[in-house]
Image: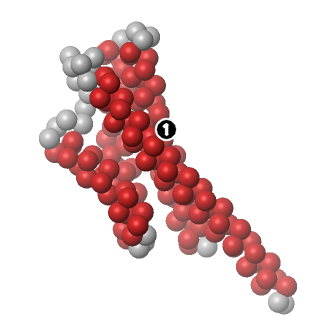
Amino acid sequence: MWNLIFWIICLLINLGLLAIVFYSLLCLTDLEVDQMDPFVATANINRWILLEFALQAALSILLLFTGHWILFLVAVPLTCYHAMLFIRRQHLIDVTEVFRNLNTDKKHRMIKLGVYMIFFTICIFRVVLFAVNLIINDDDDIDSY
């Protein structure tokens, strides 16, 4: 039962990370085609960056403390990248340089989106696996009485 709860928490964290990265990609794309003002776009993206970093760190810590070493080793480079950006004060998008760094920012967010999609797929698989396993084991317990 605890494994199922753990994987549901990981699934919800990944869903939040996917939503944040997808939203920031959408804002950058709208900015690229002049659908959005640079001030509004950077304000909308910068509002969610710290939450993304916190969710990624929470996911990595959760994987570390529960002993999921391989997934932790896959998640820790992105967490270290976020920490490096935060320490260097490069985590926020600057309004004056947004057009100069637009393609680079989009590429970084596409890579993040790919990593988060891989984690989301793994979490979905594990939730289904543990839910089915829990249902099958509960049916065996009922039949034994």
Colour scheme in the image?
A: secondary structure
Location of residue 98 with respect to 57 vertically, above or below: above
Q: Whole-percent x and y of residue 21?
A: 43, 36
Looking at the image, residue 115 lies above or below residue 38:
below
Residue 105 position within the rendered picture, expressed as x and y whole percent measured from the top left: 31, 30
Q: Which amino acid lies under the numbered mark 1 shown in the image of this protein? A: Ala
- Residue drawn 24% across the image and 19% down it: 100
Give the quarter of the image for residue 50.
top left
**What kind of element bears circle 1?**
helix
Residue lying at 39% horizontally and 40% vertically, measured from the top left: 111
Residue 12 in sight here: no
Q: Is residue 110 visible?
A: yes
Instruction: Specify few, some or many for label 1: CA neighbours under 10 Å numbering under 14, 14-19, or 20 or more.
Output: some
Residue reaching furthest to the top: 34
The total of numbered circles placed on residues is: 1
Residue 96 locus on image (x, y percent): 20, 16
Q: Is residue 86 above or below residue 56?
A: above
Q: State which quadrant residue 29 falls in.
A: top left
Q: Quadrant of the C terminus?
A: bottom right
Name the residue that disc number 1 marks.
19
The quarter of the rendered structure image containing the N terminus is bottom right
Q: Who's the residue at 38% across and 16% down the image?
A: 31
Q: Is residue 94 left or right of residue 72?
A: left
Outermost residue toward the bottom in this view: 145
In the rendered image, residue 25, in percent from the top left (x then y), is placed at: 42, 28
Is the residue 72 above or below the residue 45 in the image? Answer: below
At 56% across and 52% down in the image, what residue appears?
Answer: 121
